Amino acid sequence: MSPIDNILEQLIEESRELEKKIATLSRKPYIIGFISKKYIKCGKKNCKCQTNKNYYHGPYYYLRKEPDYKYRTYLGKTIPENIEEEIKTGILLKEAMERKRKIDQTIKKISNLLVKK
């Protein structure tokens, strides 16, 4: 077996392992996105935020999701516990999917080179 065949075999094995990891992670609740926080001025005339330019209300937490992170969902003044865990799962899932995509591209390129020989 040539060194290239060994590398190809290792990549195929890693791709299979990532496929299992993706399947396991996708069974859990997940969110692909991030939490942002915002400080605001309220608009009430007698509020401290109107007279003190350095005073704001907040933080208020928002969830921004893929694909464009444009839209946000209000979470409140505190971050719900389950949201953080779901975001962590989403990050792991996204990383595994990206890694698998790159490995599969590499496998395809190597296979094409071997066929041409």
Image: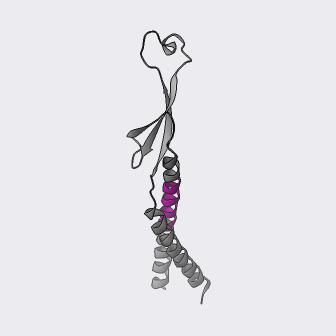
Q: Please, is residue 25 above or below residue 14 in the view?
A: above
Q: Please, is residue 117 above or below residue 81 in the view?
A: below
Residue 20: give x, y in percent of width and height: 49, 72
Residue 36: give x, y in percent of width and height: 49, 38
Residue 86: give x, y in percent of width and height: 49, 53
User: Is residue 91 found inside the magenta-colored segment of the image?
Assistant: yes
- The residue located at (44%, 63%) in the rendering is 26
Q: Nearer the viewer, residue 13 or 39?
A: 39
- The main secondary structure of the magenta stretch is helix
Residue found at the very far front of the displayed protein: 81
Which segment is the magenta one?
88-101
How many numbered discs?
0
- The residue located at (46%, 20%) in the rendering is 41
Q: Please, is residue 67 above or below residue 27 in the view?
A: above
- The residue located at (47%, 80%) in the rendering is 111
Q: Nearer the viewer, residue 82 or 111?
A: 82
Q: How is the image coloured?
A: one colour
User: Is residue 14 found inside the magenta-colored segment of the image?
Assistant: no
Q: Quadrant of the N terminus?
A: bottom right
- The residue located at (49%, 43%) in the rendering is 80
Q: Quadrant of residue 42?
A: top left
